[in-house]
Image (cartoon, grey):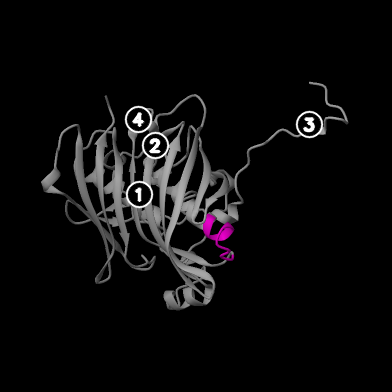
Amino acid sequence: MLVTAENPAAARPLLTTTVAKEYVHRAALAEVFLTGWAKTGPASFRVSAQWPRSHSFYECENGLYDPLLLCETVRQTFPLLTHVAYDVPLGHQLSWSRFQYAVNPEAMRLERNPAELELHVTCSDVRVIRSLPASMSMHIEAVRDGTTLAVAHTRFGCHTPAVYRRLRAGRAGEGAFVNAPLPSPPVERTAVNRHRLRDIVLAPASRHGRWQLRVDTTHPVLFDHAVDHVPGMLLLESVRQAAHALQPFSPGMMPASMDATFRKYVEFDEPCWIEADPVTETVQTGGGRQTVRVTAMQGDGLAFSATTEMVDTVP
């Protein structure tokens, strides 16, 4: 088409970009999955996202996207909206307290083009201190091509730098990251259905159903930037891997749903123990499904707990 001075708009096609990486607390542009947002109501928003057909960590199995790619997409959504819609300044810290999701495996299928998603987000239970949110909940429906791909619910806190320093009791800052011990040797790749050693987050322990959390701060995705505690996404990955390691699942088993509670920060400087047990009431409920409960213990206390339903996606 001929572009003339009378038709300058023709020279400026509508282009798709990602949101600013700072708004989703990522260092690498390649790890930003959100592409835009709009306000649709007093406390509701539409967030657009794109998933790549291949990812270095969130691997596609049996022609399906990884459900933890959804988890990371949701994790990016709550800092984005707190910054752009609720005016929380950059530099404030966010902390997960609860996270639930359930995916529709049929809508997770890989296609010829990257998946384009719309996330319909409703914010609620917003607790405000000095005009800024201190905590809030988000309900999210992820839609792909008009079909519900997943539903999720999350609650998290927003902390000023001063409050965060008090919460961390001297652990805030990059010192903990720099001085983190080297990771323990991993379990076998086949035990956790992982192809690369660096992606394994469990190390052997003294008995079946128990492992040491393996924290590799050089991992380019899980540790995209320096942090002073174990990231929530690493704990969610430990749930998936513990469920696989608990018993020999089919490689096609995916964590189709999860209900996770973050109770306290997991630190770098002492061992964290991951334990998994089948939920006996629903073991092998038919259709290649099993529910597994996973806990993370550090020191004398429970740091994290989750229940996941593993679903066999192999026809």
Q: Left or right: where does residue 231 sit relative to residue 31?
A: left
The first of marks 1 and 2 along the sequence is 2
Q: Are marks 2 and 4 in contact (CB under 8 Å)?
A: no
- In the rendered image, is residue 302 in sight? yes
How far separated are the C-alphas under marks 2 and 4?
10 Å
Q: Position of residue 189 (x, y in %)?
A: 31, 41
Q: Which residue is mark 3?
A: 11
Label 1 vs label 4, nearer the camera: 4
Q: In the rendered structure, which segment of residues is drawn in magenta?
A: 81-89
User: Which label's residue is closer to the chain start, 2 or 4?
Assistant: 4
Q: Quadrant of residue 65?
A: top left
- Disc count in the image? 4
Residue linked to disc 1: 237
Q: At which x and y percent is residue 64?
A: 38, 31
Residue at 32% in and 66% down? 263
* Neighbour tally class for label 3: few under 14, some 14-19, many 20 plus, Cα within 10 Å: few
Say which element carries label 3. Answer: helix
Q: Seen in the image, is 252 located left or right of residue 35?
A: left
Q: Is residue 251 above or below residue 79?
A: above
In the rendered image, is residue 66 in sight? no
Residue type at tag 3: Ala
Three-letter code, disc 2 = Thr
Mark 1–mark 4 Cα distance, whole angstroms, equals 22 Å
Number of the front mark, 1 or 3: 3
Residue 162, numbered circle: none
Instruction: Left or right? Give the position of 31 relative to 205.
Output: right
Q: Position of residue 85 (x, y in %)?
A: 56, 58
* Mark 4 crowd level (few <14, some 14–19, many ≥20, 10 Å Cα): few
User: N-terminal of the two: label 3 or label 4?
Assistant: 3
What amino acid is at disc 1? Glu
Task: Report how far apart the C-alphas of labels 1 and 3 lie in the structure.
Answer: 45 Å
Report the residue marked by disc 2.
148
